[in-house]
Structures are given as structure tokens and as C-alpha cells.
Image (cartoon, helix red, strand yellow):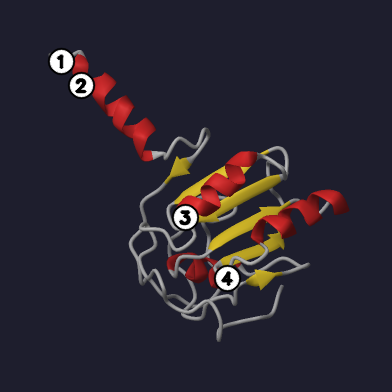
């Protein structure tokens, strides 16, 4: 019977990913408001301490402060980030992906190890192409998803600037 347990754990982990290949998940407590510049375990961050002010959801052409964007993730937003050197066609593809979705952020992100990363509170997926179908699957699962500690809280009325 001891042999079945690792298989069972593996099966539960696969089911918990919602069938999104490459999905990484993390656990962070909510409500940890701090000031100043913070250091995060993931790049871009997928949860953790954050500023008391959230980033207004929307499309940005300049990088965002991690500390504000993470607060938006706590509210149920999904943050789509891309390398600043992504071509215009790739950026247009990502804009279409988030178009009409009120709890999303889209911005360039310096230092990404893949061309595109998508993050929600406690979840992240990195992909090589902006038209990767897993991006929409991630959005469908995590935008205002059950893992957001403050799902439904505002994604407007916060900070609208960039770095």
C-alpha cells in the first residue's frame, strides 16, 4: 500500500493544476501590507507581501511596481508580463487575450527568463509564445478564481502609474 501513496499524490497534483501543463503553484498568506521595495521568490512575483495600494487593472506599456501588482493579484487579478523586446505582433496577441477582461494587468517585465509569464495569486505559468493556448486556460481558471484571497475586491481606484 505504501507504493500507491506517491502515485496518488502525483495524481492529485496533476488534477489540481487544472490540466495546465507547466503550471507552478505557491502558497502565500494574504493581507501582508508593507511599504518600500520588496524582494520576491518568483520573477515576476505570484503572491506575498505587497503595498497597501493595488495597481489598477489595465494594459500598460511600461513596467509596473511589483508591490502594487501583487496586491491586485490578491484581489483576483491575473498579471500577464512579457519581455520588453517582444515584437509588436506578440504584444498585440497579448492585448487581444486580455481585451474585455476587467481583472487583468498586461505589462512589459524586465529580466523574464521566458518571453511571456502569466501570474495569479499563488500560481504562475511561463511560455515561449504569446499565442500559447495555455495562457487563455490560465486566465479562465485564475481571473477572479477561488485561490484569490480577496476575490472581488477592487481592481480600480488604486495606483495607475508605472515605474
Q: Kindly identify the residue that appears in the image at 69 percent across and 80 percent down.
A: 161
* Residue 23 x/y as whole percent: 49, 39
Q: Kindly identify the residue that appears in the image at 20 percent across and 16 percent down.
A: 4
Helix, strand or loop status at disc 2: helix
Q: CA distance from mark 2 to mark 4?
A: 41 Å
Helix, strand or loop status at disc 3: helix
Mark nearer the N terminus (3 vs 4): 4
* Residue 103 x/y as whole percent: 54, 68
Q: Which residue is mark 4?
A: 102
The answer to whether mark 3 and mark 4 are in CB contact below 8 A is no
The answer to whether mark 2 and mark 3 are in CB contact below 8 A is no
Check disc 3: other Cα within 10 Å, few if <14, some if 14-19, many if 20+.
many
Q: How many labels, in total?
A: 4
Mark nearer the N terminus (2 vs 3): 2
Q: Quadrant of the C terminus?
A: bottom right
Q: CA distance from mark 1 to mark 2?
A: 6 Å
Q: CA distance from mark 3 to mark 4?
A: 13 Å
Q: Is residue 87 visible?
A: no
Q: Which residue is mark 2?
A: 5
Q: Is residue 17 visible?
A: yes
Q: CA distance from mark 1 to mark 4?
A: 47 Å
* Residue 96 x/y as whole percent: 72, 57
The quarter of the picture where residue 92 lies is bottom right
Q: Which of the numbered marks, if any, corresponds to residue 142?
A: 3
Q: Which residue is mark 1?
A: 2
Q: CA distance from mark 2 to mark 3?
A: 29 Å
* Residue 90 x/y as whole percent: 80, 49
Mark nearer the N terminus (2 vs 4): 2
Amino acid at each position: 500500500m505504501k507504493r500507491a501513496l506517491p502515485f496518488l499524490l502525483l495524481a492529485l497534483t496533476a488534477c489540481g493544476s487544472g490540466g495546465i501543463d507547466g503550471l507552478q503553484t505557491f502558497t502565500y498568506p494574504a493581507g501582508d501590507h508593507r511599504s518600500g521595495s520588496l524582494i520576491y521568490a518568483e520573477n515576476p512575483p505570484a503572491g506575498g507581501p505587497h503595498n497597501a495600494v493595488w495597481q489598477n487593472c489595465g494594459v500598460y506599456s511600461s513596467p509596473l511596481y511589483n508591490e502594487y501588482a501583487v496586491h491586485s493579484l490578491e484581489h483576483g487579478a491575473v498579471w500577464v508580463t512579457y519581455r520588453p523586446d517582444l515584437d509588436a505582433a506578440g504584444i498585440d496577441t497579448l492585448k487581444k487575450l486580455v481585451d474585455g477582461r476587467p481583472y487583468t494587468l498586461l505589462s512589459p517585465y524586465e529580466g523574464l527568463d521566458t518571453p511571456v509569464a502569466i501570474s495569479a495569486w499563488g500560481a504562475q505559468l511561463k511560455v515561449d509564445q504569446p499565442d500559447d493556448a495555455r495562457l487563455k486556460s490560465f486566465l479562465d481558471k485564475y481571473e477572479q478564481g477561488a485561490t484569490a484571497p480577496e476575490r472581488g475586491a477592487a481592481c480600480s481606484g488604486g495606483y495607475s502609474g508605472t515605474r
